[in-house]
Image: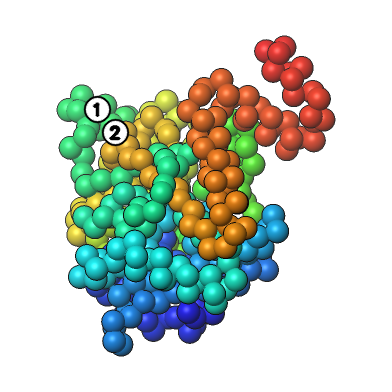
Amino acid sequence: MLDSLAAAEAAWRRLEERGVLTPYQRFDWVAAVTAAQGTGGGTIAVAVVKLGTRPVALLPLLVTSRWGLRVAEYIGADISNAGWMIVDPDFSRSLGRGQLETIFAAIGRVTGADLVAFYDQPAEWQGLANPLLAFPHQPAPDPFYGGRLGTDRLSANRIRNIMRGRRRLAEIMGPVRLEQAKTSEEIDAYHAAFLRQRSARFAEMGVGNVFAEDWFIRFFKAAARQSLGMKRPILRFHALFAGDEILATAFGTYSGSHYSQYINSTATEGPAVKYSLIGILLHELVEELRADGITSIDIGLGDFPYKELWAEKLTVYDGAVALSGKGRVAAPLLLGLRRLKRTIKQHPRLFKLAKRLRALARAGVPARSAKEGHGGK
């Protein structure tokens, strides 16, 4: 058990060379998140499993105290799209529940954690079954969209519409092209466009713009700058231009031959908005990724209609492994809260009410007004 990213880096990077992992367990991603966000008073605990001197599995955890408990979660779990235990595929066949229980017991002894919580875990990744699903688990609140890279899911009519919109944009605004940010100045320009577009979109949705928070700005810019010149960046900024105007952006991360679109944005006003900007953006992006040797893609968590055109809708899973008596009491309560969140998101009226309450809370409206506002509508 290692208590810092620096202590774990050598084994981590060695395991990345042959291990299966999502981009959100990549050392560079985790290090960039931690540098920008900090640990919130928690302690880092990286569990490294070795066969002899060879690392074969790794769990990058942050242990925090809340609700009178010590809870271990993946580092950066609150902003990641997928949770995963990094595993050497040759070792995964030997990694059953008994071995995992031994690993978790050691985590509990060293860190004092009462439970380990895992959120948004795919059932499989790059053809490898998720070993942590040997423990009881349940569907996570949001679906995950991922699959083989390509445009096979698009109908011929859909592709024609995308290309027609692209031509029209070129006619009224100038040449349409997708560009990567290759300098610090371009990173700043693409990021500024992203913030403008995202802030406007979130305002329409009635939610705050987490990406405008200082630490998120630090994270995005530092990760993108560190990635300049990398074949597989920690974070790459793309911008869709028509003429000199940025109409959409895509920020994504990589792991091996996989690309994860972390977040995107599109213009919310002007003549371009009547065209499918997200469709044009993704079509251009998929073609670029294919040429770069990328074979799979995900568009992250959450339901949006456009996602089903580009990736398969998949269920991901939450789990909680109790490591103490307090953990055995708390684990079902924690998972119960996650089930409640899923229930709300799957029922449109409940979700609409939840968003309204959240918007009113952000605006400082007293709680008693929420029922009045909903009833009045």
Residue 103 rendering spot, x and y as whole percentages: 42, 71
**Element at badge 1?**
helix
Q: Is residue 141 above or below residue 260?
A: above
Which residue is more in the foreground, 98 or 181? 98
Residue 280 in sight: no
Query: In the image, is 77 to the left or to the right of 122?
Result: right
Residue visible at 50% across and 67% down in the picture: 61
Per the model, the C-alpha gap separating discs 1 and 2 is 9 Å
Q: Which mark is residue 309?
A: 2
Disc 2 residue crowd, few under 14, some 14–19, many 20+, Cα 10 Å: some
Looking at the rendering, which quadrant does residue 245 occupy?
A: top left
* Residue under numbered circle 1: 158
Query: In the image, is 31 to the left or to the right of 166?
Result: right
Q: Residue furthest top?
A: 376
Residue 44 rendering spot, x and y as whole percentages: 55, 73
Looking at the rendering, which quadrant does residue 132 occupy?
A: bottom left
Residue 123 in sight: yes
* Number of numbered discs visible in the structure rendering: 2
Which residue is more in the foreground, 100 or 340? 100
